[in-house]
Amino acid sequence: SAVISQKPSRDICQRGTSLTIQCQVDSQVTMMFWYRQQPGQSLTLIATANQGSEATYESGFVIDKFPISRPNLTFSTLTVSNMSPEDSSIYLCSGRHPSSYNEQFFGPGTRLTVL
Amino acid sequence: KQEVTQIPAALSVPEGENLVLNCSFTDSAIYNLQWFRQDPGKGLTSLLLIQSSQREQTSGRLNASLDKSSGRSTLYIAASQPGDSATYLCAARGSSNTGKLIFGQGTTLQVKP
């Protein structure tokens, strides 16, 4: 299995500012993903983080709002830009491990509150 | 487009009871299906992964089954304990190794002492 950590674990931010969330995996993973979980809801995929190239975004999510980096096989960042209260959510990083039948693992999440 | 549904949305049972959580998916061409547990305000813990060629997987008191033809999976929890209280999510992966996980809305379980 893979262990995924995220920083920060939570933050309270002002409207109009940006926050960068870091995701670190303890082993190399084939694919990394960023999800959003709004209060009381299930998980929605934001994008697939591609190593060394631009992320692949899902419908409804754009790079200007959620820029993503993945410089190597174990690290990725998600930035939530120009935040509004509607961005208040839990943001979860996920990785797919190649040697575990491609089982997908999740980080502990970053709880973001935008005032 | 794959859709995943979980029934019931919430369940409350007395300690010691055996229970079944249900998950259905609309597109049977899945690569695999995973069951997760989520405690309030926390991330997801992977419980069981069933490949498309498998019928069931077991881990301790948990047993997950998969019936692709009917588009259903169940998670069976034996001898439930208060520590099992959490939200349980199922997620179906599309029909390739690079397919995306599509999540259900989850079943929130409360096990009363």
Image: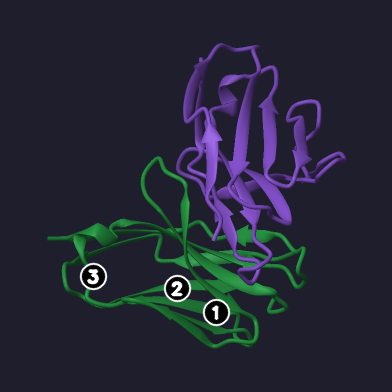
Chain colours: A purple, B green
**Residue at mark 3:** B80
Q: Position of residue A1 (x, y in %)?
A: 54, 61
Alpha carbon of mark 3 to alpha carbon of mark 1: how far? Answer: 22 Å
Q: Chain of mark 1?
A: B
Above or below for A6 versus B52: above
- The quarter of the picture where the N terminus of chain B appears is bottom right
Q: Secondary structure at mark 1?
A: strand
Q: Nearer the viewer, mark 3 or mark 2?
A: 3
Q: Nearer the viewer, mark 3 or mark 1?
A: 3
**Residue at mark 1:** B72
Q: Quadrant of residue B58?
A: bottom left
Above or below for B113 versus A114: below
Amino acid type for the residue under numbered disc 1: Arg
Between B6 and A97, the residue placed more toward the observer is A97
Q: Position of residue A73 (x, y in %)?
A: 73, 47
Amino acid type for the residue under numbered disc 3: Ser
Query: Residue, x 54% and y 36% (percent of image)?
Result: A6
**Residue at mark 2:** B22
Res A90 visible:
no
Q: N-terminal of the two: label 3 or label 2?
A: 2
Query: Residue, x 73% and y 30% (percent of image)?
Result: A66
Q: N-terminal of the two: label 1 or label 2?
A: 2
Between B14 and A6, the residue placed more toward the observer is A6
Q: Secondary structure at mark 2?
A: strand
Q: Position of residue B28 (x, y in %)?
A: 68, 79
Q: Do the CB atoms of the residues marked 3 and 2 lie less than 8 Å apart?
A: no
